[in-house]
Every structure is written in C-alpha cells, then in structure tokens.
Image: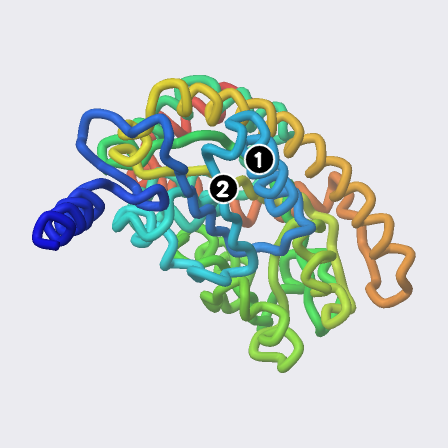
C-alpha cells in the first residue's frame, strides 16, 4: 500500500512540474514546438471594414498554414481596448497585435503626425513609396527604440468631411462648427482651428452616438468607416475633399515577437505581407463602392471638391507645415515635399 501511495505522489509531482498543453512556456530561448501559440489582435473598427476584414483573413490563413499551432484571436470594435489604451496594452503584453491609425501614435511618437498634414499625399501609391523609403525607415526606427515592432502598413484611405449643419465648400463654411478629431494629434486640432472650427477629441467607438446627439457638428473620416458605422445617416452633408490620409500600422511587442520560433515568425511575416496587399485592394474597392452608395442613398448631400476649392483650403492650411516642422522633423517634411 505504501508503495502504491509513493507512486501516486511521484506521478502528481511530475504532473505539477511538467508544463501543461495550454500554457505558454517562456524560457527566453525557444518555444516548444508542440505548444499552441495564441495571439490576441485588438482593433477599434468594425469587422466589415478593410482593416477588420484583413485581420480576420490573417487569422484564418495563419491557422491554416500553421495547422492550428498558432491561433490569432481578433477583437474588433474596441471590445478589448479603446483608442488610447491599445499601445499600453501591447507594451504590457495584454495583447500581442494592434493596428492603430497613425494619428494615435502621435502621443508617444510625434513624428507620425506627418500623415495628418493636410494634402500631404496625392494618392495611396505615394504613401506606400514614402513608407518604403526614408520616411518609413525613420518612423519605424522610432518604434523599435521603444520595443515596438512594425509588421505592416494598411490603408484606410483619404478622409472626407461630414457634418449635420450645412454644405462645406469653402474654408469660411467651417466657422462656428465643432468637429471630432482623433486623439493625440495636435496637427488635426490645428487643421480645424485654421479653418475656423472647434476641434474636440473623441474616441471612435463613441462617434456615432456623439454625432447623433449633436455633441459636435461633424467629423472627418474615410468613406469605409463612414459607411460601416452608419455615420452618414446622422450627417446629412458630406464633402469629398480627400484632404488627409488615414493609414493603420500593424504593431507587435518586439520582445514577444523575438521570443517566437523562427519558423513561426516566417509564416506570420509572409502571411502578413500577402494580406497587406489584399487589404490595400479592399480599401480602394470599399471606398469607391461606399461613396457611390452614400451618394445614391438620398440621405446625405454629397459635394465633390473642385481644384479651385482645393487651392483655397490649401492656402489656409499651408502654414501648419511650418508650425510643426520642428515637431515632425524638417528632414521628414522635406522628404515628403520631394516625393510629391
């Protein structure tokens, strides 16, 4: 009997000291090949946006290509973390992937406000060219110094202006209106101030309700976000100004990323590159179709900005480049101007 009890105790001790199948073992050297890796991917937009669809596609492909060894769990619509909370969650290890808009990085990394400069890019191709060159090297380098690894750059598209009060055609039409702006970007605040409007910081998950209750008059966004969040239904006036670009940076914790086995990282990186190309095409397609839908809805009056009107806006907004040259970096602004 004593022998039987001794055997049982030994087996129990062995079980306690042996890592369970569902636990992540971190020995700072390698990850056991037979353990499942769970990656939490948090973002704030809807599932049916270009970013939301790309995140789901990435999760499905990774699961298939790793034969279930890696599970990417996607949490859209701020279900885990809201604007302003994601970066801290990434750095603390609460999540392993996020994809914030460039503006939201500006709190810790002011140089990323280069994307908020008005009319800074002519088209998506110029954006990608910038991120594949000196500008990308400089911006990504700043993230790496803070233990953040960039995995991809996804498009949302060019921003339009919506509001509930009146058609906006000329700069003076902004006078006495209030507009929601993304958190952390002083450039976006200055943009609306230059136009004579009042900027109000607000999170994306509360945007529809804030517009519906007239907490502020309008907002700026890409058409895919305007459609998927039904913002146009409470914003009867829309101006196709394409005055600013919105992109997303897919990020991970660098220390976490480096802890993954090389073969897993290779699959994750190659799949991310493939999904990035797909996401960019989806953004173009959805923005084109979304604008057509809103224009035909009869709910929102759509105005397409002319070249003359664009020049008037640019004349008012151009001083922002000089005012923020030291914050963003004169080298980055010069590089953008040369690119265009």
Callout 1: helix, strand or loop?
helix
Counting from the top left corner in percent of width and height, residue 177 is at 59, 71
Left or right side of 197 for 331? left
Residue sitting at 63 percent across and 48 percent down? 159
Residue at the outermost bottom position: 213
Kindly identify which numbered label has been placed on residue 72.
2
Q: State the residue in front, 23 or 298.
A: 23
Counting from the top left corner in percent of width and height, residue 145 is at 22, 32
The quarter of the image holding the C terminus is top right
Callout 2: helix, strand or loop?
strand
Q: State the residue in front, 40 or 290.
A: 40
Counting from the top left corner in percent of width and height, residue 120 is at 54, 35
**Residue linked to disc 1:** 58
Counting from the top left corner in percent of width and height, residue 200 is at 48, 68
The quarter of the image holding the N terminus is bottom left
The answer to whether mark 2 and mark 1 are in CB contact below 8 A is yes
Q: State the residue in front, 254 or 161.
A: 254
Note whether residue 278 is visible: yes
Left or right side of 186 for 19? left
Kindly identify which numbered label has been placed on residue 169.
none
Residue sitting at 17 percent across and 43 percent down? 14
Residue at the outermost front position: 1
Residue sitting at 48 percent across and 40 percent down? 71
């Amino acid at each position: 009997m004593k022998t039987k009890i001794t055997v049982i105790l030994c087996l129990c001790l062995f079980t306690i000291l042996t890592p369970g199948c569902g636990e992540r073992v971190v020995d700072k050297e390698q990850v056991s090949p037979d353990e499942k890796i769970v990656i939490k991917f948090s973002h704030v937009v809807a599932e049916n946006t270009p970013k939301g669809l790309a995140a789901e596609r990435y999760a499905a492909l990774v699961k298939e290509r790793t034969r279930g060894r890696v599970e990417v769990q996607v949490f859209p619509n701020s279900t885990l973390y809201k604007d302003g909370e994601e970066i801290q969650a990434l750095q603390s290890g609460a999540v392993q992937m996020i994809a914030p808009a460039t503006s939201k990085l500006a709190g810790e990394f002011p140089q990323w406000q280069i994307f908020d400069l008005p009319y800074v890019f002519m088209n998506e191709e110029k954006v990608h060219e910038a991120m594949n060159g000196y500008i990308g090297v400089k911006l990504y380098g700043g993230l790496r110094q803070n233990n953040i690894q960039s995995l991809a750059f996804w498009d949302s598209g060019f921003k339009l202006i919506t509001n509930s009060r009146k058609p906006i055609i000329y700069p003076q039409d902004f006078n006495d209106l209030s507009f929601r702006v993304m958190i952390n970007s002083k450039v976006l605040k200055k943009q609306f101030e230059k136009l004579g409007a009042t900027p109000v910081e607000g999170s994306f998950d509360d945007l529809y309700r804030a517009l519906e209750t007239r907490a502020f008059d309008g907002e700026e966004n890409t058409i895919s976000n305007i459609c998927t969040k039904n913002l146009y239904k409470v914003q009867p006036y829309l101006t196709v100004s394409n005055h600013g670009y919105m992109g997303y940076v897919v990020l991970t914790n660098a220390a976490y990323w480096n802890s993954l086995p090389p073969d897993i990282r290779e699959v994750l990186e190659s799949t991310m590159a493939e999904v990035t190309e797909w996401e960019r095409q989806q953004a173009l397609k959805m923005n084109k179709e979304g604008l057509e839908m809103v224009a035909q809805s009869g709910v929102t009056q759509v105005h397409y900005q002319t070249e003359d009107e664009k020049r008037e806006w640019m004349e008012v907004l151009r001083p922002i480049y000089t005012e923020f040259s030291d914050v963003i970096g004169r080298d980055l602004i010069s590089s953008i101007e040369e690119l265009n």
